[in-house]
Image (cartoon, rainbow, N blue to C red):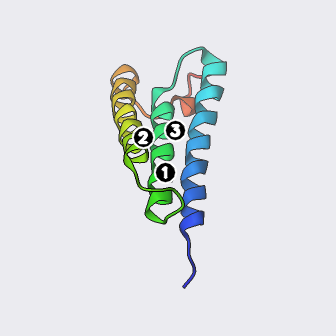
Amino acid sequence: MIDTALLWIALTATASVFGACVFFIYYRKTGNADLLAVAWVFVGIAGSIEISMANGYLPENEFFNGLVAGCLGVAVVVGIVGVRRSGTGFQLWNDDVR
């Protein structure tokens, strides 16, 4: 059987980088923050750390568990604020962005 843990870690890290790129592109175009992209970044970071701990690449200790919980907590709060503020998903693909 092929160990796909590194593939999944890379995919979650790529999702995090994608969210950061969306945030910076949208911020550069409009001057407003796309908070759902920030939430995406934190979920990707938490996922990468969790998969790394589950497969033995990082030690499972209180620091990394707290880091995962903190990232997910920040993602939930930022995501709620982003949805309440904009009412939609990623703002980069809206027609009114120039």
Residue 38 x, y percent position in the rendering: 50, 31
How many numbered circles does the render carry?
A: 3
Residue where numbered disc 3 is placed: 41
Q: Amino acid at mark 3?
A: Val
Q: Any mark on residue 15, and which? A: none
Q: CA distance from mark 2 to mark 1?
A: 8 Å
Inspect this view and state whether residue 22 appears: yes
Q: Which residue is mark 2?
A: 67
- The 10 Å Cα crowd at callout 1, few under 14, some 14 to 19, many 20 or more, is many
Local secondary structure at mark 2: helix
Is residue 98 shown to the viewer in this render? no
The quadrant in which residue 4 appears is bottom right
Q: Which residue is mark 1?
A: 49
The N terminus lies in which quarter of the figure?
bottom right
Looking at marks 3 and 1 on the same chain, the residue that comes earlier in the sequence is marked by 3
Which element is circle 3 on? helix
